[in-house]
Image (cartoon, grey):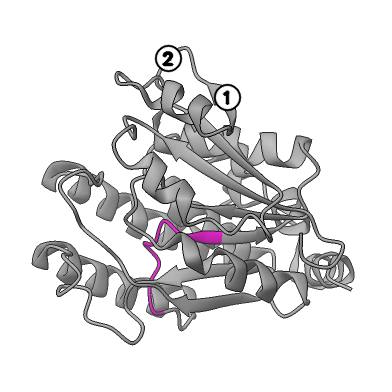
Amino acid sequence: MLGTRRVIVVMPAYNAALTLRRTVKEIDRNVVDEVLMVDDASGDTTTDEARRLGLVIEVHDANRGYGGCQKTCYSKALEHDADIVVMLHPDYQYSPRLVPAMAAMIAFGEYDFVLGSRILAQNAVEGGMPRYKYFSNRVLTLLENLMLGTKLSEFHTGLRAYSRALLEAIPYERNSDDFVFDNQVIVQAIAAGARIGEVSCHTRYEPESSSIGPWHSIKYGVGVLRTANQYRRQQRGKAVYPYLQVEKADAGVAVLNSAAH
């Protein structure tokens, strides 16, 4: 807990038995009140390992996809009275030690949404990121910043912290069940007028870490650009997309800011 703010870490898990223990071990339980894992119908012993670690567990009977798994994560965290929700991959790719810092940025009213950027202040390729992923990350981020009018260093990170008010303001349940869910959430946050911060995040690419292949990466890239274009079209009054029907900036910022104080 930070002050009076209840902090919950959520982990969307799929075949994470080999890395779950290392990830959980580095979560600061002096700050984090609960670790909630959603097992997206894994084929290994992910759920058994989570029980041994004493995590709060939700198990999908059938695989719902990365986005579908996150939807359950956030809904359950809100049900469990989270004030701050930090999404952390259980594959040990992102550092759990950043959770307190990211949660504090929200708890003390500076931001509504915090991203752990692998690009800031480090060489992600030296950390093991494949060069084609690094190149596509930089190109997509550049295009998204141009299309959305933002200045984020990375749109494609899997380490994120949210205020409760932001999660309640955006209709994340309308998003894709696939990997583009992550990008849609950022665009929804922008549409809501959320204050978005970033922290430098060291990344590890190990044999046990999860990663999408080239074909899914291409599909994801197309979805990312489609999402940015949909936002632009809606902002210009040329189309309406249900998943982008969030609280407007004048009302949204007031709601988010009032929740932070």
Residue extent of the magenta highlight: 153-160
- Does 34 lie within the magenta span? no
Name the residue carrying label 2.
62
Q: Residue furthest bottom?
A: 121
**Of helix, strand and loop, which one carries label 1?**
strand
Q: Position of residue 111 (x, y in %)?
A: 68, 75
Q: Position of residue 112 (x, y in %)?
A: 69, 69
Q: Position of residue 17 (x, y in %)?
A: 33, 32
Taking the spot 48% from the left edge, 30% from the top edge, the residue there is: 50
Q: Main secondary structure of the magenta part?
A: loop
Q: Position of residue 245 (x, y in %)?
A: 67, 51
Left or right, residue 89 beside residue 127: right
Q: In the displayed structure, would residue 185 be above or below residue 146?
A: above
Taking the spot 59% from the left edge, 45% from the top edge, the residue there is: 243
**Of helix, strand and loop, which one carries label 2?**
loop
Kindly report the distance in space between the C-alpha atoms of the residues bearing marks 2 and 1: 12 Å
Name the one closer to the observer, 70 or 126: 126
**Number of labelled discs?**
2
**What amino acid is at disc 1?**
Glu
**What amino acid is at disc 2?**
Ala
Taking the spot 58% from the left edge, 27% from the top edge, the residue there is: 57
Left or right, residue 170 beside residue 40: right
Q: Are marks 2 and 1 in contact (CB under 8 Å)?
A: no
Name the residue carrying label 1.
58
Name the one closer to the observer, 210 or 258: 210
Does the rendering let one see residue 36?
yes
Quarter where residue 109 is shown: bottom right
Taking the spot 50% from the left edge, 19% from the top edge, the residue there is: 60
Q: In the displayed structure, would residue 210 be above or below residue 120?
A: above
